[in-house]
Image (cartoon, grey):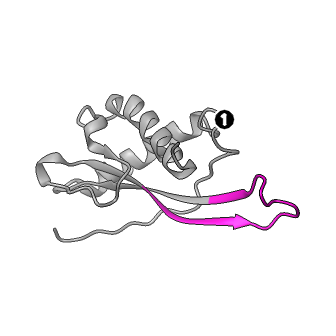
């Protein structure tokens, strides 16, 4: 049995793999990974990494051994390179947001999803 975090990452990856090729034909399932440690190569960019940043378990009376309310912080990292990397990442970020907004419960897997922040990191490599 898979952990709920794994199921959530897989559900997000499946939705992105289904819809992102319509935005950028290069973004097939092979460029979308649920592991942050996936090796990336310039010839395989753009790529998307989906990983867990944080999980909080809310205290609830009488929760043990029953259900627990969990809040998961999930990152969808877009990696692009080249002269137009910033613009490419912006287009992909907008598409990712729209795709995830289509089904905020990931097929009733979660209570809901919300965009809480965007971080932009531009490196020289």
Location of the C terminus (image quadrant): bottom left
Query: Residue 122, image x and y in percent?
Result: 28, 68
Q: Crowding near pointer 1: few (<14 within 10 Å), some, many (20+)?
A: few
Which residue is located at x 53 percent, y 45 percent?
8
Which residue is located at x 79 percent, y 61 percent?
64
Left or right of residue 15, residue 35 in this image: left
Which residue is located at x 76 percent, y 52 percent?
67
Query: Residue 20, image x and y in percent?
Result: 37, 34
Which residue is located at x 35 percent, y 28 percent?
22
Q: Is residue 52 magenta?
A: yes
Query: Residue 6, image x and y in percent?
Result: 48, 48
> What range is drawn magenta here?
51-71
Front-most of 75 and 62? Answer: 62
Residue lying furthest right:
61
Which residue is denoted by mark 1 in the rendering?
108
Front-most of 71 and 41? Answer: 71
Front-most of 63 and 24? Answer: 63
Q: Is mark 1 on a helix, strand or loop?
A: loop
**How many numbered circles are shown?**
1
Asked if 125 appears above or below 78 in the picture, the reply is below
Left or right of residue 61, residue 123 in this image: left
Q: Is residue 64 magenta?
A: yes
């Amino acid at each position: 049995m898979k952990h709920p975090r794994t199921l959530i990452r897989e559900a997000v990856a499946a939705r992105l793999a289904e819809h992102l090729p319509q935005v950028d034909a290069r973004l097939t399932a092979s460029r979308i990974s649920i592991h942050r440690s996936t090796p990336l190569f310039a010839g395989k960019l753009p790529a998307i990494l989906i990983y867990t940043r944080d999980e909080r378990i809310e205290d609830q009376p009488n929760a043990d051994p029953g259900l627990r309310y969990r809040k998961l912080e999930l990152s969808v990292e877009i990696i692009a390179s080249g002269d137009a990397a910033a613009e490419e990442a912006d287009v992909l970020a907008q598409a990712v947001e729209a795709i995830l907004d289509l089904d905020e419960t990931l097929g009733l897997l979660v209570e809901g999803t919300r965009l809480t922040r965007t971080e932009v990191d531009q490196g020289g490599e």
